[in-house]
Structures are given as C-alpha cells and as structure tokens.
Image: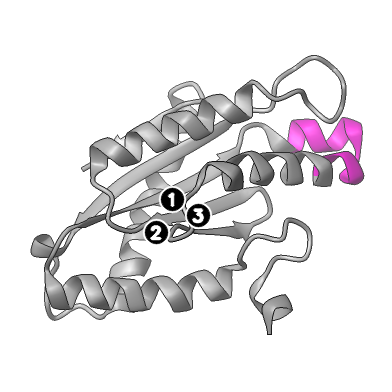
C-alpha cells in the first residue's frame, strides 16, 4: 500500500495521494469554517537547461536533492507530493499566510544553498507560489475537490508569474 502512495524516485507522496488526502482536508475546512491552510506550488527553475547538458540521471539527483531539502523542513502533518516532472505541491494544514510565507522562504533558501549534483558550482533554485485558504471564505456549495482544483489552477498560473519576475522567489497571494 505504501508503495502505491509514494513517488518511486523521491519517496514523497504522489499526486494521486495528494488529491485524495487534501480533498478530505478541504471538506473538513469547509465544514468547520475554522482556521486557514496554505497551498504551495513549487518548480525547479530552468530544469530543462540543467537536465539537457548533464543528463537525466543527474536531473534525477537534482530532483531528489530538492525534495530531500524540503522534506526535512516539514511537519508530520504537512502533505508534500510530486505533482509532475520537476513540479511539487505542498499542503500546510493549520497555517496562516504569514507562517506559510516564512516556511516557503526557508524552503527556497535551503534549496538554493545546497551544492548542485552536477558539481558545476551553480545553485539549483526553485520558485514557489503560496496561497492561503481560510474556512470562513469558502463557498459552502463547492466540493472539497473543486476547492482544491481551483486553488491549484490559481497557484499554477501564479507560479509562472513568479518565474517571469525573476525566478528563485516566493510569490504570495492572499
């Protein structure tokens, strides 16, 4: 069962597990209308430009390095998953926007200070989009799945804004 929930390369949760679990969390938030949660979308900056010259094995090492850095920072209650390729998603329960931004900056700086697996002296960086969802703001007619899909769609769009504004940054939306 555990194997079916985890990404085989990184060992973090897979996209399917993330959607199943966070949909339940969103339903609880909608029902209780209590507290806030944060959702982060993360993407390794210029990954194709890294992967092409150094090869897929080195690219895999870079992905494992990034996920390892992030995973060590997180609480047990946080849900961290590989969304696809070099994109990751993170759900932080019981976390307001200010605390979420602090965590996102810590993640960003931790990754940027690690040596690249390519040994080229160039850091691997990530861009992060962060959004907060508070229970009292949720439309009670939306399902937990629709809430999650809507938040991910907004986060994915905003992630590209972060990249257009210079990469290696946290982009925050309320």
Under circle 1, the secondary element is helix
The residue tagged 1 is: 156
Counting other residues with Cα less than 10 Å from the Cα at mark 3, is it few (<14), some (14-19), or many (20 or more)?
many
Nearer to us of marks 3 and 2 is 3
Q: Quadrant of the N terminus?
A: bottom right
Find residue 73 and report its horizontal and vertical position in percent: 53, 41
Using a 10 Å C-alpha cutoff, classify the residue at mark 2 as few (fewer than 14 neighbours), some (14 to 19) or many (20 or more): some
Image location of residue 123, percent across then percent down: 70, 21
Where residue 20 appears, as percent x and y from the top left, is: 46, 79
Residue at image x 90%, y 33%? 54
Contact, mark 2 vs mark 1 (Cβ under 8 Å): yes
Residue visible at 58% across and 28% down? 110
Please state which of residues 125 and 34 is positioned toward the viewer in this rendering: 34
Using the numbered discs, state the Cα–Cα distance from disc 2 to disc 1 in whole angstroms.
Answer: 6 Å
* On-image quarter of the C terminus: top left
Q: Residue at x 59, y 44 (%)?
A: 72
The disc label shown at residue 152, or none: 2
Q: Which mark is residue 89?
A: 3
Q: Is residue 44 within the magenta segment?
A: no
Residue ranking furthest to the bottom: 1
Q: Is residue 161 left or right of residue 6?
A: left
User: Looking at the image, is 28 positioned above or below residue 44?
Assistant: below
- Which comes sooner in the sequence, label 3 or label 1? 3
Is 22 situated above or below 53? Answer: below
Are discs 3 and 2 less than 8 Å apart at CB?
yes
| Residue 125 image position (x, y, % from top left) | 62, 28
Crowd around label 1: few <14 · some 14–19 · many ≥20 (10 Å): many
Residue appearing at x 67%, y 40% in the figure: 66
Bounds of the magenta segment: 48-59
């Amino acid at each position: 069962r555990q194997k079916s929930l985890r990404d085989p390369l990184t060992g973090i949760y897979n996209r399917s597990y993330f959607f199943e679990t966070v949909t339940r969390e969103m339903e609880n938030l909608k029902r209780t209308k209590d507290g806030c949660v944060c959702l982060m979308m993360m993407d390794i900056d210029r990954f194709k430009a890294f992967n092409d010259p150094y090869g897929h094995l080195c690219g895999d090492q870079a992905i494992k390095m990034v996920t390892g850095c992030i995973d060590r920072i997180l609480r047990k209650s946080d849900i961290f998953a590989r969304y696809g390729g070099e994109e990751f998603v993170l759900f932080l329960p019981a976390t307001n926007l200010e605390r979420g931004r602090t965590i996102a900056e810590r993640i960003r700086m931790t990754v940027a200070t690690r040596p690249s697996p390519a040994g080229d002296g160039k850091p691997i960086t990530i861009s992060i989009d962060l959004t907060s969802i508070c229970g009292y703001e949720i439309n009670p007619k939306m399902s937990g799945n629709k809430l999650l899909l809507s938040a991910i769609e907004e986060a994915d769009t905003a992630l590209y804004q972060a990249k257009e504004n210079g990469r290696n940054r946290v982009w925050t939306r309320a």
